[in-house]
Image (cartoon, rainbow, N blue to C red):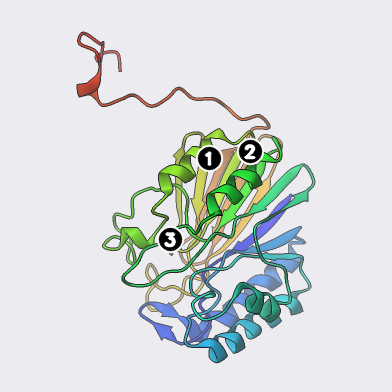
Amino acid sequence: MRLAVVTDIHHGRVTFVKQGPRALGLLEAALRRAREAKVDAVVELGDRISDVDAAADFALESEVGRVFAESGLARHHICGNHDRAHLSADRNAVALNAPLGTRAVELGDIRLAFWEPDVSLSRARGFSLAPGDLESLRDLLGRSDRRTILFSHAPLSGHSMRGNYWFENNPAHATYAQIDDIRKILAEAPCPLLAIAGHVHWNSVADVDGTTHLTLHSLSDSTFSHPEPSGAFGWLTVEADHVLWRVDGLSPVAMELPFPAAKSSRPATLPRFSDLAKGADLISA
């Protein structure tokens, strides 16, 4: 199974290092490559636009939707905070002419799980889940023990934003306030998991409780390639017991990661050394 993945297109105006006027051309070129590669589907992880107001946003979203439709590729979308700033999920779905919402799709022996929690965000408020969001994640992951790729807009690893242009000084805006609850649900899920997200505008990999978390860089962000936009576009190939992950563009990445058919178990993390019983052996660690 092979997927193409793109995120944080940010079609629209220039904002900070986001080269919005270049976004549609970059997207068209990337989708041509995906069509030539005969991928099974393309997954888009949200923040398709840089928001302005309801009318402008719907026009921008519709232009992005047109490019995806003209590619002829099977496609899956989720919403980011910019997509929902002035538009409902229903209006986004109309603009894209594609379904949205929390759901799962089976592709061969792999489940693609799309989690759509509340993505409301403002400068004064970080991400926070709405009532029912945790339950929807638990239900989504609890339905099967098959290998599952979990897609979300914001990353679910809770890993450090040290060195991140956007979020080093704004960590509450990088993931959810309920990240400990999310981590527990992922750890307790019966399925082997690979989690992929956008939002933070860089390529990263983290392992938390046996789940590998990947983030994909923004298509139009020029943080690492100034003044040129990155053109970041991901390729995910699932093989027998591993995945190949490659990111094309001006900030390239290539790696091979395990993705076994059965979920592995891990011991609970060690408590603080100061809380261990007197005489506990730390030297062997």
Q: Is residue 236 above or below residue 202?
A: above
| Amino acid type assigned to the residue bearing label 2 in the image | His
Residue lying farthest to the top in this orientation? 279
Q: Which residue is mark 3?
A: 202
Tell me which numbered mark, 2 or 1, is placed earlier along the sequence: 1
Tell me which numbered mark, 2 or 3, is placed earlier along the sequence: 3
User: Can residue 208 be seen from the camera position used here?
Assistant: yes
Task: Measuring from the top left, give residue 153's x and y in whole percent.
Answer: 53, 61
Badge 2 marks a residue whose secondary structure is strand
Q: Quadrant of residue 76?
A: bottom right
Rate crowding at label 1 as few (under 14), some (14 to 19) or many (20 or more) other CA atoms within 10 Å: some
User: Residue at image x 59%, y 82%?
Assistant: 25
User: Residue at image x 75%, y 67%?
Assistant: 36
Task: Measuring from the top left, give residue 13's x and y in whole percent.
Answer: 46, 87
Rate crowding at label 2 as few (under 14), some (14 to 19) or many (20 or more) other CA atoms within 10 Å: some
Q: Which residue is mark 1?
A: 185
| Amino acid type assigned to the residue bearing label 3 in the image | Trp
For the residues labelled 1 and 3, say whether their Cβ atoms are less than 8 Å apart.
Answer: no
Tag count: 3
| Near-viewer residue (106 or 118) | 118
User: Can residue 28 be seen from the camera position used here?
Assistant: no
The label shown at residue 14 is none
User: Residue at image x 54%, y 59%?
Assistant: 117
Badge 3 marks a residue whose secondary structure is loop
Residue lying farthest to the bottom in this orientation? 55
Left or right: residue 274 versus residue 41 is left
Task: Measuring from the top left, give residue 189's x and y in whole percent.
Answer: 59, 36
Tell me which numbered mark, 1 or 3, is placed earlier along the sequence: 1
Q: Quadrant of residue 60?
A: bottom right
| Amino acid type assigned to the residue bearing label 1 in the image | Ile
Left or right: residue 182 versus residue 159 is right
Q: Which residue is mark 2?
A: 242
